[in-house]
Image: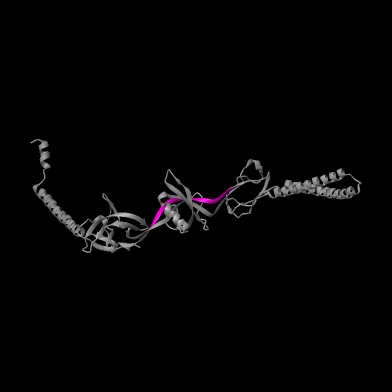
Amino acid sequence: MTSDSKSIGSRRISPRIILIVAGAVLVAGFLARNYFVGEASHKGKGADTPSVAIAPAQRRDIPVYAQAVGTVVANATVQVKSRIDGEIVGAGFKEGQLVRKGDLLFQIDRAPYEAALRAARANLQRDEAQLANAQLDLGRANKLVKNGYVSEQTRDAAIAQSKALAGTVAADRAAVDQAELQLGYTEIRSPIDGKTGPYLVDVGNIITSASGTPLVTVTQIQPVKISFALAQQNLPKLQQALASKSLVASLKTHGEKDGEVVAPIDFIGNTINAASGTIELRATYDNADMRLVPGEYVDVRVRIDDLKRVIAVPRDAVNTGQDGQYVYVVTPAMKVELRNITVLDQAGDLTAIDGAVTEGENVIVDGQLRVAPGMGVKIAAKGPAAS
């Protein structure tokens, strides 16, 4: 026997060891089989009667809402400009400040306009004195012409002189009014209540009225308008509600879950958008809390109708399958039935439906994935009734 043959023979496994290993494998397999069979048996018994949550269907009125995304629009936006030329010597507000109508925004140098007003008044005073003298001359000429001491031509010249000076005085008074007006324009005041934007021209700059450069923009944000569009088929109901002054919009900041506010709708457009088939509406919100900012998007709901005495179920009860929408109904015998339905509308957590579901029947609102038509179920919980 060679050395290699001896080496191979020395590695042969003992029959006793083989028997021990085989026995251990058989015992482990038996125990594993009993474990998994027991688990499957336990699960099978639980699957026979799955637990579900139910809620009763109710017959009630459901409001119908039209929804849209609206844009907040400033009630008024004014670009404040100067009516005169001059140097800006002061500003009466801070950027972003709320101002009232008539509040001082900018002060233009008054000195040139005060001087112009003094000159206009001086001219008026001079010409009024000349007019008074001309009227005295006219009075004397009238007396002398009667006695033949002066000619009628001289008297007529006195009349013309008096009238000419009267016209000059009238022009002087207009010049004084104009000078006072120009002096008043040195104070640039807010034309509306609103919020100021940033300075567009800083103090110290010389401005001209001809340039048309705005100094600041004032935006009225109390109240604000909310512009949105609804489908044209809603127009008759919208017009009817507007005539009865019952048309309102429920507003919520875009993406916000709570905090809905109500604003009356006071405008319906006079033209339907041919491209989208919609018509513009506007609601007015007082914005006393300053929550809305021009340009912001808001979610809008408008109540346009009511579904009278329809079957309503919780929204969670409605399922969608290959053949459309359906609900699972639990019969008095605790069996599951599938009922095909048509969704009429949704209002909050409620869904108005049409189909083979009657008032008082219990629909499954949780556990639908564990059931099938004809299965028996047990009630784990009762959900709230449609409210």
Pick out the residue farthest to the top: 2
Residue 284 image position (x, y, % from top left): 50, 55
Image quadrant holding the C terminus, namely bottom left
Residue 130 image position (x, y, % from top left): 83, 47
Residue 250 image position (x, y, % from top left): 44, 56
Residue 14 falls left or right of residue 233? left
- The answer to whether residue 291 of the structure is visible from this angle is no
- Along the viewing direction, whichever of 354 and 153 lies nearer the viewer: 153
Image quadrant holding the N terminus, namely top left
Residue 318 falls left or right of residue 205? left
- Along the viewing direction, whichever of 198 and 344 lies nearer the viewer: 344
- Along the viewing direction, whichever of 211 and 377 lies nearer the viewer: 211
Q: What stretch is highlighted in magenta?
A: 63-78
Residue 325 image position (x, y, % from top left): 29, 53
Residue 346 falls left or right of residue 164? left
Verify whether residue 74 appears in magenta.
Answer: yes
- Secondary structure mostly seen in magenta is strand
- The answer to whether residue 10 of the structure is visible from this angle is yes
